[in-house]
Amino acid sequence: MRDTIAIIALFLVFTLVNAQQYNEAENIEFSQYMYNSFTVNPAMTGIEGTPNFTINYRTELIRDFNHYTREAALVSFPAKKKLAFGFSIINDEFDNIQYTYFDLASAYVLKLANDSDVSFGLKLRGNLLDHRFPETASRPLQDFYNGLVNRFVFNIGAGVVYSNDWFFAGASIPSFLNTLHYDIGELQVDTRKLPIVFHSGYVFLLGNDFSVMPTFFTRFQDKEQADIDLGLNFLMKDKFGVSGVYRLGDSYSIFTNFQVFDSLLVSFGYGNQTSLRTEGLAISNDGIFQITLRYENVLKRGSKLFTRF
């Protein structure tokens, strides 16, 4: 059974590789899904099997531009009476633009045979957009920017995840409603279609103290737009881990994870782009740096091995 699932997962990976890639303006949400999984797929809420609290800071250094930064705080609680809950606050800033996200997620866990589960998740999101316009902007630009100050957008998302001790596969629509973005050339706020996400991972035990988990993460947006991430995660003695993620034709990330105490994990990450995100403009990127702290009682975690990476 495990070999059959592994073959299916590999087949999906190679099928998705053939999809046309899509590189939009920086979208931090989906480049950090491993540290905010239930905001991308609410069915992942509480899947660790124990309460946990995560703090994440990320900065991207771009020459001649202000930095992208993200601060995030997330908390989730495992299922009791089949219901799990999670809450997050995420703050993104770039140049004069600030997005603040408030996510409330819940998952309903249905127990299946052979110690496997199917989780159905629902997420409510509020997004506060604030654009601090430059004082030197022309009157039309000032009027346009004024319309973006303290703009609040509501959204809803849903997802499903199948999981057992060593495998998970999920799909989600992080937001059903089209999001607002602005076209500075046309001085207007327009709508943008939201993606469909697929993600999966499979744990191979290479010994009593060493395991490896290949993963893939894909989001489709419109008909010819897709991001495809291939990852490889190593874990030794549940204490030290190394992870690498490559977004095809776009970027890479490397993470080192240290379980410094039974209740505290520290992760350091570095990444960079292999493509230009802004068409027609050569941007020099000095890299993406991040640090993550996660608190959870690892001695009380459930039996799902993939949650340890």
Image (cartoon, rainbow, N blue to C red):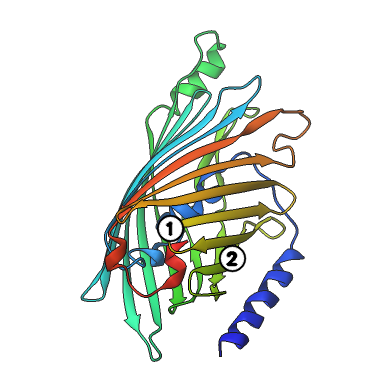
Q: Residue at 38% across / 86% down in the picture?
A: 115
Mark 2 vs 1, N-terminal side: 2
Amino acid type assigned to the residue bearing label 1 in the image: Lys
Q: Which residue is mark 1?
A: 239
**Residue found farthest to the left:** 81
Q: Judging from the image, what secondary structure is the residue with disc 2 in?
A: strand
Q: Position of residue 308 (x, y in %)?
A: 43, 63
- Residue 178: tell me if it is visible: no
Residue 199's place in the image compared with 229, above or below, is: below
Residue density around tag 1, few if under 14, some if 14–19, many if 20 or more, within 10 Å: some
Q: Quadrant of residue 119?
A: bottom left
Q: Residue at 32% across / 62% down in the picture?
A: 298
Disc 2 from disc 1: Cα separation: 20 Å
Q: Judging from the image, what secondary structure is the residue with disc 1 in?
A: loop
Q: Position of residue 86 (x, y in %)?
A: 30, 57
Determine contact: label 2, label 1, CB under 8 Å: no
Q: Single out the mark in the foreground, 2 or 1.
A: 1
Amino acid type assigned to the residue bearing label 2 in the image: Thr
Q: Position of residue 117 (x, y in %)?
A: 39, 80
Left or right: residue 286 versus residue 113 is right
Left or right: residue 255 versus residue 110 is right
Q: Which residue is mark 2?
A: 215
Left or right: residue 96 versus residue 297 is right
